[in-house]
Image: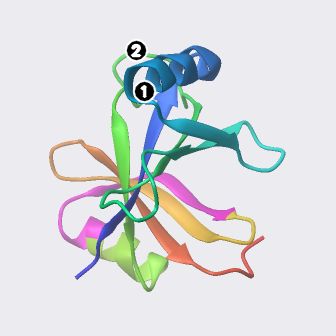
Amino acid sequence: MNRVVHFEIHADDPARARTFYQKMFGWRFDQYGPMDYWLIYTGPPDQQGINGGMHKRIGRVDGSAVTGYVCTVDVDDLDAAIERVVDNGGQRAVAKQPIPEVGWFAYCKDTEGNIFGLIQHDKSAA
């Protein structure tokens, strides 16, 4: 089985969204490297749950932009997973891309048009 290991919040104004989630839930946000990407810590490491990330929304809110949380599933082989998505009636949404020193990720859509992320950990990704 493959577990959900990460979620993402896409925001028009990441600073405004950080303030909202900090006030609402007490979440901690740490900038990830030089990118405009923020790691989200939703609780202490000894507590059950997952952490996430936030970045500026990809696309405008016009019916095609991501407007919800995106959950990311850990896979052993990203290329094979993307192929399974397409073979099972889903679609590629954002092409395979590196996350330096973390791995490779892509966004796909299920048969209902819902976006989800796939990640293959590989510290040599660049």
Residue 90: horizontal and vertical position, in percent?
A: 24, 58
Neighbor class of circle 1 (other Cα within 10 Å; few <14, some 14-19, many 20+) is few
Residue numbers of the magenta segment: 85-98
Q: Is residue 61 above or below residue 5?
A: above
Q: Is residue 11 left or right of residue 29?
A: left
Q: Report the residue marked by disc 2.
A: 62
Q: Is residue 3 left or right of residue 11?
A: left
Q: Report the residue marked by disc 1.
A: 65
Residue 84: horizontal and vertical position, in percent?
A: 28, 75
Q: What colour scheme has been applied to the protein in the rendered image?
A: rainbow
Tell me the amino acid under the disc marked 1: Ala
| CB contact under 8 Å: marks 1 and 2 | yes
Q: Is residue 1 left or right of residue 26?
A: left
Q: Residue at x 43, y 45 (%)?
A: 42
Query: Is 9 or 63 nearer to us in this picture?
Result: 9
Residue 68: horizontal and vertical position, in percent?
A: 33, 31
Disc 2 is placed on an element classified as loop
Q: Is residue 122 left or right of residue 100?
A: left
- The answer to if 120 sits in the magenta stretch is no
Query: Is 77 or 47 nearer to us in this picture?
Result: 47
